[in-house]
């Protein structure tokens, strides 16, 4: 594969765990679930499997940063357009890793995600997607956190999805597409 100087990189962190092994929720599953939503990026998509545990574990954080930097050395990726996204626990990882590495990632899209990353000031644009009927991850906690960050000056958009079940992962793809359009405008 020949990389082009305009290539973007998109990180997709998978959701859920089956014990210590992320099965059947894998990076490949995230590519399939969000493929149409991310298509507008024309990006190199990196969808790793967790090394065990949560995406907020130090080992997974180090692996994510290493893999991103390694990919950027190997391919001609525009360092101004590096997105981290994830669904559910993967979205928690997008919050956590994105907040701690804003020098590397230039946008974050947590989807149906538990809040992670604490009270960090966000300097990169964040597009949060959450259903008002999510029965697993609290909509109100996500909205409260997003509103607090926006109140502190973060470039943040919160998309409320109406009546969508948490387990309808692929149904979030069109909303990810909206996030991509918003980020592209922010990156200009």
Image (cartoon, helix red, strand yellow):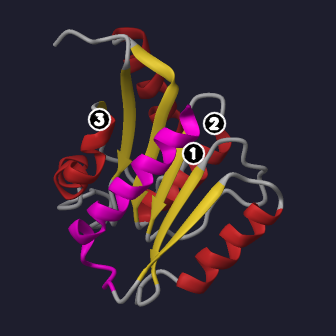
Give the answer, above or below, for where 68 lies relative to 113. Answer: above
Give the overall secondary structure of the magenta segment: helix
Foreground: disc 3 or disc 1: 3
Whole-percent x and y of residue 143? 62, 77
| Dot placed on the residue nearer the N-terminal end, 3 or 1 | 3
Q: Are marks 1 and 2 in contact (CB under 8 Å)?
A: yes
Residue under label 1: 97
Q: Is residue 117 magenta?
A: no
Query: Hey, which quadrant is residue 80 in on the image?
Result: top right
Give the answer, above or below, for where 38 lies relative to 19. Answer: above
Residue under label 2: 101
Using the image, tell me which numbered label, if any, was put on residue 45. 3
Whole-percent x and y of residue 151? 81, 65
Q: CA distance from mark 2 to mark 3?
A: 18 Å
Query: Hey, which quadrant is residue 7 in on the image?
Result: top left
**In this picture, residue 65 sits left or right of residue 173:** right
Q: CA distance from mark 3 to mark 1?
A: 17 Å
Residue drawn 55% across and 34% down?
187
Q: Are marks 2 and 3 in contact (CB under 8 Å)?
A: no
Stretch of the chain drawn in magenta: 164-188
Q: Is residue 170 magenta?
A: yes
Query: Hey, which quadrant is residue 90 in on the image?
Result: bottom left
**In this picture, residue 183 sits left or right of residue 71:** right
């Amino acid at each position: 594969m020949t990389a082009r100087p305009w290539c973007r990189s998109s990180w997709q962190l998978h959701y859920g765990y089956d014990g210590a092994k992320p099965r059947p929720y894998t990076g490949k599953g995230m590519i399939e679930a969000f493929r149409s939503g991310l298509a507008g990026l024309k990006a190199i998509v990196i969808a790793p499997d967790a090394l065990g545990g949560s995406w907020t574990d130090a080992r997974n954080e180090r692996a994510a940063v290493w893999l991103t930097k390694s990919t950027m050395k190997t391919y001609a990726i525009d360092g101004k357009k590096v997105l981290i996204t994830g669904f559910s626990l993967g979205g928690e990882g997008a919050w956590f890793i994105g907040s701690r590495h804003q020098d590397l990632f230039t946008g974050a899209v947590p989807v149906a995600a538990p809040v992670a990353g604490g009270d960090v000031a966000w300097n990169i644009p964040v597009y949060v997607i959450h259903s008002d009927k999510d029965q697993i991850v609290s909509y109100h906690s996500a909205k409260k956190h997003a509103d607090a960050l926006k109140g502190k000056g973060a470039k943040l958009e919160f998309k409320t999805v109406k009546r969508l079940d948490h387990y309808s992962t692929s149904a979030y793809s069109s909303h990810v597409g909206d996030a991509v359009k918003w980020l592209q405008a922010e990156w200009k």
